[in-house]
Amino acid sequence: MEIPLILLFLSFIIFLILGMPIAWVLLSSSLIYLFLKGTLPAVLPQRVVVMLDSFVLIAVPFFIYMALIMNTGKITDKIFNFARIIIGRVKGGLGYVNIIASVIFAGMSGSMLADIMGLGEIEIRAMLNAGYDRKFSAAVTAASATIGPIIPPSVPLIIYGYLAGASISRLLVGGVIPGLTIAAYQMVIVYIISKRRNYPIEESKFEWKKLLIGFKNAFPALLTPIIVLGGIIIGFVTPTEAAVIASVYATLIAIFVYRSINCANEVFLCFKETTVTASRILLICAFAAAFGWIFTWERVPHRILEFIIYLNISKVQFLLLFNLIVLFLGCFISATAIIIMLTPLVTPLFLSMGIDPVHFGVMFVLASMIGLLTPPFGIGLFAISSISKVDIYELSIELIPFVIVTILALITITLFPNIVLFLPNLLFD
């Protein structure tokens, strides 16, 4: 291995340990390599421009904005109340409500942190008022938020699809059943813990009138995922166009239907936050492009493929090994950064092994999202801890059973590709 490539890897690890933001880690490591190679003037600007000059990536800020406008407009309240009416009266009911609300909101936000910041405070407060333990309430809220980036729309799946050259439409549809699978696994844990700790049951009786009122209030919001998925499935719009339409729709219902946004300043703040959040993601994308080009130029994927062939491992073994690597990296690096860094590297590998890019993508995104719940640097942990006022250590302990079942869901999706591929094959083939 040549010295510039060795220094690329060493500088990357050192900068990460020093706590440098991942975008600047990628840029700095790439600059060191390119300076040593003497190819800086041509490569870096070219790779950055090519990466960002993408119609597909336009969907990212629009989906981020849609989640923010939903949160600002308190539309999440309507979603939570509707889920509570449906299943709030069984033992552990609010735990199930928490998960169902995340499934519904996942069809609007496409982001784990949007789920936590939008629904988190409402869910935790409701569970505490009903007599649930604070740590349990926080753990369910954090765990259920992992569903957000799996069920469409999904910002991570869009980024992966663009980098891997996979069909964005098939990826988004492919996340539906896996998202519901994760929810089912997590509900089992809620049932077991609720029975063991004897959590209370809501005393209110089920009334069809309340259900109809709750559905009526939530209906405009529930149409959002239908607009996104429906438009993509029937071929009326591309994922990017669906993101634009859905964000405009979310703004209109927040202003004119729910009347929860009363001034232009609130919309402006959503635009501002969208700009900041999208800029962070796209900055990582831009600098990762140069980093990925170096990997390609140095034939790193080819070398890894030769090593895998030498080891003679099967597809399943490769996928399980890859999941372990992503779960480990997730303890230290953000999910978006992992997806952006690894996708260009592993795409030639899994394609050469005959692995479907849609199956791989959904599996990859889920594995990277689990890292948001694990110490020491899980962003989801810090977000929930700040909302719930639960210590990071105590929250990590309470999350263990949820992390375990979510990993079991990941293994299930890994071993049974048709869980991901059934809907895309049914609707698009």
Image (spheres, rainbow, N blue to C red):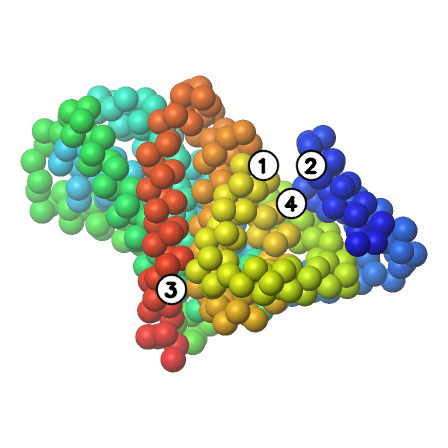
| CB under 8 Å between discs 2 and 1 | yes
Q: Taking 152 as reference, is 85 above or below it? A: above
Using the numbered discs, state the Cα–Cα distance from disc 1 to disc 4 in whole angstroms. 17 Å
Mark on residue 16? 2
Quarter-of-image position of residue 115:
top left
Q: Residues within 10 Å of mark 3 (few under 14, many from 20)?
A: some
Q: CA distance from mark 4 to mark 3?
A: 32 Å
- Indicate which label's residue lies in the foreground, 1 or 4: 1
Residue that protrudes farthest toward the bottom in the picture: 429
The Cα–Cα distance between marks 4 and 2, rounded to whole angstroms, is: 17 Å
> Residue 10, how many percent across, how many down?
76, 41
- Comparing labels 4 and 3, the label whose residue is closer to the camera: 3
Residue 401, position as x, y percentages in the image: 33, 34
Q: Amino acid at mark 3?
A: Pro
Q: Which numbered disc covers residue 332? A: 1
Sequence-wise first label, 3 or 1: 1
Q: Which mark is residue 280?
A: 4
The front one of 381 and 169 is 381
Mark 2: give few (<14), some (14-19) or many (20+) Cα within 10 Å: some
- Using the numbered discs, state the Cα–Cα distance from disc 2 to disc 1 in whole angstroms: 9 Å
Describe residue 161's horizontal placement relative to residue 16 as left or right.
Answer: left
Q: Which residue is mark 3?
A: 417
